[in-house]
Image (spheres, grey):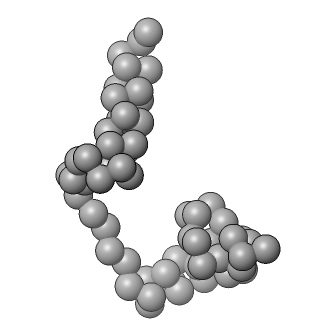
Amino acid sequence: MSKFSDELMESMQQMNEILRGEREPSREFHVDALQVQEIRKATDLTLTKFTVPIDDPDSPQSRA
């Protein structure tokens, strides 16, 4: 495998460990509601179209 592939596989393994609670994330990002609203306006996306790519469990699409 290439170096990129090796790094990608390692990153995916780390992600799975974090999801299973076996590892702490190295960093976290917190975005407040006003920032989300500004980003959504800047991207010109509806709420439904905006929440799908970020995999928001409260998205109207997730509840369908």
Q: Residue 42, position in %: x, y?
A: 58, 77
> Which residue in the rendered view is the most extreme toward the right?
64
Residue 54 lies, with reference to residue 9, above or below; the image says below
In this image, 29 relative to 64: left or right?
left
Query: Where is the C terminus found, in terms of image quarters?
Result: bottom right
Q: Residue at x 36, y 49 (%)?
A: 20
| 43 lies left or right of 17 | right
Question: Would you place residue 8 above or below residue 2 in this image?
Answer: below
Q: Nearer the viewer, residue 44 or 23?
A: 23
In the picture, the quarter occupied by the N terminus is top left
Residue 64 visible in this rendered orientation of the protein: yes
12 over 50 or under it: above or below: above
Task: Please name whichever residue, 20 or 42, is drawn nearer the observer in this view of the structure.
Answer: 20
Q: Residue at x 32, y 43 (%)?
A: 17
Report x, y in % for residue 54.
56, 64
Residue occupying the point 37% across, 78% down: 31
Which image quadrant is residue 13 in? top left
Residue at image position (38%, 85%) is: 32
Is residue 55 or residue 22 the one in the foreground? 22
Residue 61 in the image: above or below residue 26: below
Q: Position of residue 58 (x, y in %)?
A: 60, 78
Please state the horizontal and vertical placement of residue 48, each as a whole percent of the image. 72, 77
